Amino acid sequence: MRGFNPLRWWRRRRQARLLCRSRIPLPLWQQLRRELIDHYHLSAQEHHRLRRLSSLFLQRKQIVGAGDQQVTDYQRAVIAAQACLPILELDLSDYDGWTEIILYPDAFYAPHERIDESGLVHRQQRLLDGEAWDRGPLILSWKDARPSRRHHRLGDNVVIHECAHKLDMQNGAANGIPPLHRDMDRREWTRVFSASYRRLLRQIERHRHTAIDPYAAESPAEFFAVVSEEFFEAPARLHQAEPRVYRQLRLYYRQDPLSRILRSRRWQPADGGTPRHAVLA
């Protein structure tokens, strides 16, 4: 039997007090379910946990507008729900070390440095829809973070992408290997991800179609962020293309999005009609 932990008890009491006065209002959450969350086929218990996590997330993170962006409660809730989906079976402390999210109305320019083969540093401006700074803010474009963005490209989710970078940065600079659980094998993770990354590079070099977004070939860190997007947004496609990568992500996130979809497909309504999320993307 697990012994009494005063720190854990205190944290739970504190979280309960915060939730009593700052839980995302039910009407707003129901709107999010219709427009965003139902896409993920969560169980009733998972819905409850996601709302709880999202509410606590908004207590810890400040979301501020940039440019002429005015941040609404709806936008804050949309970002929180997407940010908390990857840590649904992890812990909110996995997002410790940073406190601010900067929201632009659209894609934004950010300064970047590139070192060429001769060692010269080139400074340039890049147009981005999201960016995660090590020990700094998470920066997002609302145009790309809003729920309707899903209809533009299957598997695309800038919030999950940038939050994956934040998880990756927990043990230092982003390198595609976040802190793994004790029951996971780091050598197996490295072997599986390295093989898949090299396979993607070869496909791009040979001008072949890639099931994974070619942007993943930018670096191992980008590869991890992109396949994390795919894991939650297009799990069937990722599982078919890279089943071993899918398995490692399932172990890491402690979730199985494909099983959720298959479970929803097996459900049939009493009237014999078509269930609401019956199409396997």
Image (spheres, rainbow, N blue to C red):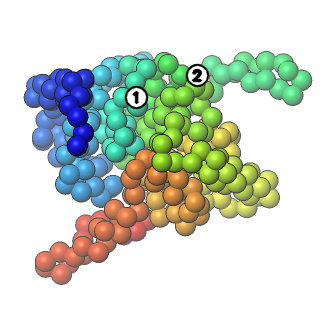
Q: Residue at x 23, y 28 (%)?
A: 5
Whether 230 is drawn above or below 223: the answer is below
Q: Name the spot of residue 86 as percent of width and height, x first.
A: 40, 43
Q: Nearer the viewer, residue 196 or 104?
A: 196
Q: Is any atom of residue 257 visible in this view?
A: yes
Q: Quadrant of residue 61?
A: top left
Is the residue marked by circle 1 packed among few (<14), some (14-19), or many (20+) residues within 10 Å?
some
Q: Nearer the viewer, residue 209 or 54?
A: 54
Query: Total label count?
Result: 2
**From the viewer's perspective, is 92 left or right of 171?**
left
Q: Name the spot of residue 32 as percent of width and height, x first.
A: 24, 45
Residue on which disc 1 sits: 95
Q: Nearer the viewer, mark 2 or mark 1?
A: 1
Residue on which disc 2 sits: 110
Q: Name the spot of residue 267 as percent of width and height, x first.
A: 24, 73
**From the viewer's perspective, is 6 left or right of 250?**
left
Q: Amino acid at mark 1?
A: Tyr
Q: Nearer the viewer, residue 157 or 61?
A: 61
Q: Residue at x 53, y 23 (%)?
A: 133
Q: Residue at x 33, y 32 (%)?
A: 92
Q: Residue furthest left?
A: 20
Quick one: SS at disc 1?
Answer: helix
Q: Is any atom of residue 11 visible in this view?
A: no
Q: Residue at x 43, y 47 (%)?
A: 253
Q: Quadrant of residue 81?
A: top left
